[in-house]
Amino acid sequence: MGTITTAGTRHDWTLEEIESIYTAPLLELVFQAQQVHREHHRPNEVQGCILLSIKTGGCPEDCAYCSQSAHYHTGLEREELLSVEETLSAARRARAQGATRFCMGAAWRSVPRGAAFDRVLEMVRGVRDLGMEACCTLGMLTDDQAEALAQAGLSAYNHNLDTSPEFYGEIITTRTYQDRLDTLARVRRAGITVCCGGIVGMGEDRAARYGLLQQLAALDPHPESVPVNLLMRVAGTPLGEQAPLDLLELVRTIATARILMPSSMVRLSAGRVSLSEETQALCFLAGANSVFLGDKLLTTPNPGQDADGRLFDRLGLRLTHGPADAGH
């Protein structure tokens, strides 16, 4: 294994180059990722985000990992769209916990028209009025819906690729990979920043992780936010009994993402509740610089405020104050 090449911002990484980075000796990989990280980000700061499920369950998609799919019996109670006041009350609590980005997720295949969408636009305006970044993940959307969200002040739209094109069909059959890329293009055209990442630990091999990272890095510009999720095994879903991932694979994925997309915020997202403090520290060292705060991530557990406070104190990390710049 030679020296990892980290020259500049690129969108044409080959699978061979990505494999060479990902499979480097771990200490070399993390060292190189930390160097890239320090060139582009404050080394001891992480952004705090909070994700609220504003409409829960009953989704017609068949994503094999998801507790909210109507295809599986997970015991999740279906809930209709929250009111604007319920959402903004949660946003105020998030701000009090130190979050600077408030994310709203709805279990829709695609964004509905009419009163429900108007309510979401009001939520976005309300979150921005609180001085926070507003992010939504609502499924597929049209050009005019993307424009309306942009006009309401939406900071970012999350729409994950989940995995590589080759492995995708093993996880989801109700929406194509191209559907996802088309949605991302609409978000970008509307002038909204892109939050796009994937999930590791779904039974994919390393080649699928290389393929996901190649797709993300090929987006031009790179996604401003790249969430790296560790599968949360949910009873009743097809992946509920999936064998646990070697957590150093998560560290390698984060470090490689940091090297391929140097300016992006790399978000240590779902699955953090199953990581030791030492593993989380290694993820931060590998270039993760954002986490989701709060005790719940949509419908799955997340470390609470006390646990995160202790962790950040021990590591000497601090939460970013105020919204990050417009690109993040």
Image: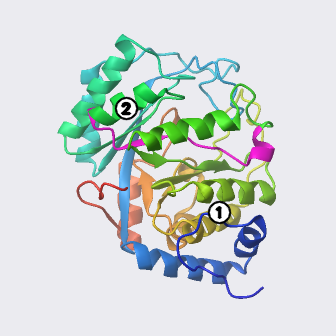
Q: Can residue 249 be seen in this view?
A: yes
Residue 167: horizontal and vertical position, in percent? Answer: 79, 44
- What residue sits 66% from the left and 58% below the top? 213
Q: In which quadrant of the rendered view does residue 54 lie?
A: top left
As drawn, which residue projects farthest toward the top?
A: 115
State which mark lies toward you, 2 or 1: 2
Near-viewer residue (262 or 235): 262
Q: In which quadrant of the rendered view does residue 69 lie?
A: top right
Q: Report which residue position mark 1 lands on.
A: 253
Q: What stretch is highlighted in magenta?
A: 152-168
- What residue sits 55% from the left and 47% below the top? 270
Q: Is residue 294 above or below residue 280?
A: above
The secondary element bearing badge 2 is classed as helix
Q: Is residue 53 visible?
A: no
Q: Is residue 23 left or right of residue 47?
A: right
Q: In this view, does 66 lie to the left or right of 123?
A: right
Q: Report which residue position mark 2 lands on.
A: 147
Residue 101: horizontal and vertical position, in percent? Answer: 33, 47
Count of numbered badges drawn on the protein:
2
